Amino acid sequence: MKKFNVNVSSEIGQLEGVILHTPGQEVENMTPQNAERALYSDILNLSVARQEYAQLKGVLEKVANTFEVRDLLTQTLQNSHAKERIINRICEREDAFCEISALYDLPEEELARQLIEGSILKRDNLTKFLSKERFALRPLHNFLFTRDTSMTVYDEVLIGKMASPVRDREALIMEAIFKDHPLFGVKTINPIVPIKNIPSSPLASIEGGDVEIARDDVILIGTGVRTTSQGIDYLIESIKEKKTSAKHIIVQELPHTPESFIHLDMTFTFLNKDEVMVYEPLILGNNKYQTIHITIDNGEVTSIKLHEDLLQALKEVGMDMKPIQCGGTKDDWTMEREQWHSGANFFSIAPGKVIGYERNNYTIEEMSKNGYDIIKAQDIIENKADIHASKKAVITIAGSELSRGGGGARCMTMPVGRKKVDW
Ligand SMILES: NC(=O)NCCC[C@H](N)C(=O)O
């Protein structure tokens, strides 16, 4: 199998490959009682969510290679060593109900299904009979947000160290795919692995929604409920050790509540070479959330300083960005409402060509005022509109149901390849 060249050195370079996960039964395998543990504030209607997701996938299929996690996992499991390794690792981490040999006996496709959708607990002893759990392996409700559990950082893949154990298995699966699938075989960095024999802090966590590769030498990282300072320090250590091209790590503190601020990409995303989408009250407003600029040179941290905000920090490294506001410029209420529904969460398929939710009217109108053509995903899918005909465009997808899962187009996409940007 010809290997895919894994490389992402910007947020906006023309998309070459992206990992997706069409939501399946795992999304509905939840009750009101455990929705919060599942990191959901509501239960989604699967058939509607799938229709909406098909719009995202349909557009991406037109412009890049798309890979489904379920297929990649099934193919990875065909390697018996990989199969054994992943089952062992999962069972080491998860509940006592995990049965290694029963899992090993499952055909690969069925095993992949159960690892994602959950595996029903067989009540064949007293403890299991009395257990309140329905599943021996819990469903991975959040896998449609492929962004968070692994991230392409230049030509390597950083494995997410999830803040909640509910998402741990997703990270294990992604690591197995990147290590053992014949398409990839790429170098992975895992925050649980010590660097230079120094164990990473038990407090370290880092999720992909917080990590934005701005340029060959600039990485933006949010820190809040999901990504800790210790998680960022781990990434810095790995950059120092390898002496990669990253020179500037710009960290943005995030509020801990409400849950729509879980990741940086819910408040700030790149749209173009010189334009970004911002949630103004956090990114530009007068607030207590700090922006910290860490400079690394030749394997050493040479300075750590504060900046007024993200835009000022980016300007200092030669990225002068015009902000376009989520929810428009006039009313705090519309900004807040649309940020809640992932209005700031755009995914770029090329410079100036982005995908976002149709439902966020004020944000879409603001994009239009800034020269973006507004194109419905369905029109691209049915060849009624040509994305190449526009200089700048927002492709809108339906997202009434998907947004209730807590994320938008960027959260649902994990790019593995982008062309270099001609800055
Ligand atoms: N990058 C993102 O912001 N991802 C959204 C993840 C939502 C998911 N329900 C979670 O809480 O992890």
Image (tube, grey):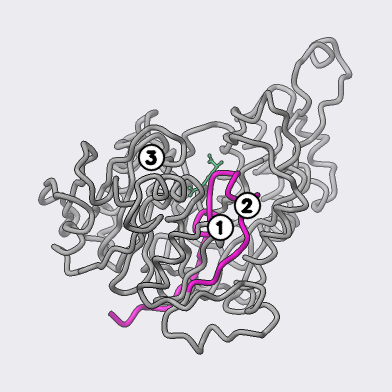
Figure quadrant of the N terminus: bottom right
Q: Is residue 241 above or below residue 351?
A: above
**Point 59% across, 33% down: residue:** 166
* Residue farthest to the right, as pictured: 124
Which numbered disc flags the more N-terminal residue, 3 or 2? 3
Neighbourhood count class around disc 1 (C-alpha, 10 Å): few under 14, some 14–19, many 20 upward? some
Q: Which residues fall within the magenta stretch?
A: 394-423
Circle 2: residue type: Ser
State the residue position of label 2.
400
Which numbered disc flags the more N-terminal residue, 1 or 2? 1
Give coordinates of residue 176: x percent, y percent: 60, 51
Circle 3: residue type: Thr
Residue 348 inside the magenta-drawn segment: no
**Point 38% across, 52% down: residue:** 211
State the residue position of label 1.
359
Which numbered disc flags the more N-terminal residue, 1 or 3? 3
Residue 416 inside the magenta-drawn segment: yes
* Residue farthest to the bottom, as pictured: 389
Give coordinates of residue 262: x percent, y percent: 43, 40
Real-space CA distance between mark 1 and mark 2, rounded to the nearest whole angstrom: 7 Å
Q: Disc 1, disc 2: CB below 8 Å? A: yes
State the residue position of label 3.
227
Q: Disc 1, disc 3: CB below 8 Å? A: no
Determine which of the numbered discs, if any, sits on residue 393 in the image.
none
Of the pair 54 and 143, the residue shown nearer to us: 54
**Point 44% across, 38% down: residue:** 192
Figure quadrant of the C terminus: bottom left
Please tell me whether mark 3 sits on a helix, a strand or a loop: loop
Q: Is residue 377 left or right of residue 332?
A: right
Disc 3 vs disc 2: which is toward the camera?
Answer: 2
Circle 1: residue type: Arg
